[in-house]
Image (cartoon, rainbow, N blue to C red):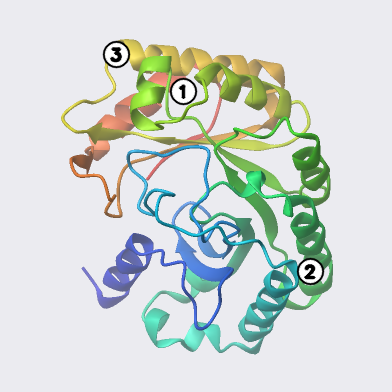
């Protein structure tokens, strides 16, 4: 493996939320985005509606609630984009051996240590992200606005207000769907909510917005999704797809690459992901990528 390949693998395997002295904004070399993704972490307090078995961020317990400082989020975001525009980010020691094409800005993405849509400042953050996109795209090149979400609050009127701003210019929702059955949903996502609510939110959201479905496939303390679970999962995909086929951008199948805090959660081989991909593409005319 070459030095560049090793550097890229290391960057993909490590997504720290810390950057310089920032609290809210951090850079990621993203496999799925295909380059540099600038993350906005609205949940440094780990506040979330899920407690996924494969999460590397850890539980909410033990973290003091931190109100979102909207002005600080905007200030950090503008400062980072200015730094990127100067060309200095590409020279950073942490990324100096990462290939140049993997350091090209692809998106600003609401993603972090919890669920972005549960904070009351979500609509205002979306408004400011959209304004920043309008200002910076002409000088540093086009980039998308994205939300990575577990879809638990997409029905909220305040979330809808934010999404109408965030996604008005070729933006996307990247939404988690890890299960076909309520039983597996409870094991892998460990949420007090129900899978039916997540499916209802996704089928409603895809009527209006482009959506990528992100699905974690892993060995969960000796248990893996069986054929019946995968079949039900594909049936769920069909329900979402059939609402508005053109808005299902792709399905992203991925397995564990970073170390979860829960012991016994392990990656599955590429062959397993590829077999699930084949089952999906046999059932649906949708793009599927494995990571």
Disc 2 is placed on an element classified as helix
The answer, for residue 18, to whether it is visible in the render is yes
Residue at 79% x, 41% y is: 158
Q: Is residue 4 left or right of residue 135?
A: left
**What residue is pinned by disc 2?**
132
Q: Earlier in the sequence, mark 2 or mark 1?
A: 2
Question: Residue 58, relative to residue 95: is it above or below?
Answer: above
The total of numbered circles placed on residues is: 3
Taking the image as shown, residue 167 lies to the left or right of residue 37, namely right
Q: Nearer the viewer, mark 2 or mark 3?
A: 2
Which part of the image, by quadrant, shows the C terminus?
Answer: top left
The residue carrying mark 1 is 281
Evaluate if marks 2 and 3 touch, with contact meaning CB atoms under 8 Å apart. no
Q: Residue at x 64, y 36 (%)?
A: 211
Quarter of the image for residue 263 reads: top left
Q: Cα distance, mark 2 to mark 3?
A: 45 Å
What label does residue 256 carry, if any?
none
Could you tell me residue 110's position as x and y percent?
Answer: 62, 55
Answer with mark 2 or mark 3, whichever residue precedes in sequence: 2
- How far apart, in angstroms, are the residues tagged by discs 3 and 1? 16 Å
Q: Is residue 75 left or right of residue 287?
A: right
Q: Choose mark 2 or mark 1, whichever is in front.
A: 2
Q: Quick one: quadrant of the N terminus?
A: bottom left
Do we see residue 181 in this rendering?
A: no
Question: Image height check: is 15 above or below 48?
Answer: below
Task: Please tell me which residue is depicted at 56% across the width and 46% down the height of the picture.
Answer: 115
Label drawn at residue 227:
3
| Element at label 1 | helix
Q: Residues within 10 Å of mark 1 (few under 14, many from 20)?
A: some
């Amino acid at each position: 493996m070459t030095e560049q390949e090793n550097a890229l693998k290391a960057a993909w395997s490590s997504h720290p939320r810390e950057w310089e002295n920032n609290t809210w904004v951090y850079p990621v070399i993203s496999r799925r985005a295909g380059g540099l993704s600038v993350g906005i972490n609205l949940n440094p307090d780990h506040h979330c509606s899920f407690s996924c078995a494969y999460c590397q961020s850890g539980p909410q317990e033990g973290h003091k609630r931190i109100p979102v400082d909207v002005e600080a989020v905007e200030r950090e975001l503008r400062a980072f984009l200015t730094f990127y525009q100067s060309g200095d980010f590409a020279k950073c020691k942490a990324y100096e051996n990462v290939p140049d094409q993997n350091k090209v800005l692809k998106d600003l993405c609401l993603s972090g240590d919890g669920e972005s849509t549960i904070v009351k400042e979500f609509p205002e953050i979306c408004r400011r992200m959209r304004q920043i996109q309008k200002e910076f795209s002409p000088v540093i090149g086009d980039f998308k606005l994205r939300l990575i979400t577990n879809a638990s609050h997409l029905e909220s009127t305040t979330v809808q207000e934010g999404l109408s701003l965030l996604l008005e210019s070729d933006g996307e929702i990247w939404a988690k769907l890890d299960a076909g059955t309520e039983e597996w949903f409870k094991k892998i996502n460990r949420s007090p909510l129900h899978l039916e609510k997540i499916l209802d939110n996704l089928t409603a959201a895809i009527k209006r917005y482009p959506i990528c479905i992100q699905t974690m496939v892993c060995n969960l303390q000796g248990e893996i999704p069986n054929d019946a679970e995968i079949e039900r999962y594909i049936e769920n995909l069909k329900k979402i797809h059939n609402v508005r086929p053109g808005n299902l951008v792709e399905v992203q199948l991925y397995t564990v690459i970073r170390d979860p805090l829960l012991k016994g959660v392990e990656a599955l081989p590429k062959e397993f992901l590829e077999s699930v991909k084949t089952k999906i593409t046999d059932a649906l005319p949708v793009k599927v990528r494995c990571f």
